[in-house]
Amino acid sequence: MADLLVHFASAFVAGRPLQDGRVRSILYVGVCLPDLLFKLLLYGGGAPTWLCEPTHTPLGLIPFCYVGALLFEEAWRKRAFFALLGGCWLHLLVDLGKNYMGNGVIAWGFPFSMQTVELGWYYPEDSPLMMLPALALIAGVELLGRLSGRRPASP
């Protein structure tokens, strides 16, 4: 739960400049999609881990985002696809900083290479500690957005 909140906070900051709230909402879904797909395949489908790994690769997420975009009406599919994909890739960037005990989780070269990468800036169990700063970041960005949206009273 805390990990998804940190991912949502990153999407909230990145999506704030977007004018269309519908695209922003799709971006929010996209940032949670890789973890949801991984858990659905692993626990819901009983798939082996190696089959779930493409849910955390840049090219492996493209088919999932394409299928997700098909759920939208035809005029919205292109925007939905890119919003989902942008959210998924933002998720991968946040996960890139995690330390998975020397075994990265992001296979940037998939399907050509299964070599994984990690930066090791923080441990996965540190996500609950990042929950309060993530909430503060969401509140701060929302407050700044509301304050900058105010116009001075006309004379």
Image (spheres, helix red, strand yellow):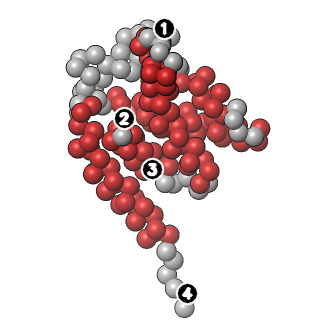
- Say which of 19 and 76 sits in front: 76
Q: CA distance from mark 4 to mark 2?
A: 43 Å
Q: Which residue is mark 3?
A: 12
Q: Quadrant of the C terminus?
A: bottom right
User: Between marks 1 and 3, how big is the CA–CA gap?
Assistant: 32 Å
For badge 4, the amino acid type reads Ser
Indicate the amino acid at tag 3.
Answer: Phe
Q: Give the residue type at disc 1.
A: Phe
94 sits to left or right of 74: left
x and y percentages locating residue 89 in the rendered image: 47, 32
Element marked by disc 4: loop
Residue denoted by label 1: 112
- Work out how far the residue at label 2 is from the one at label 3, CA to CA, in angstroms: 13 Å
Outermost residue, right direction?
A: 74
Marker disc for residue 94: 2
Q: Which residue is mark 4?
A: 154
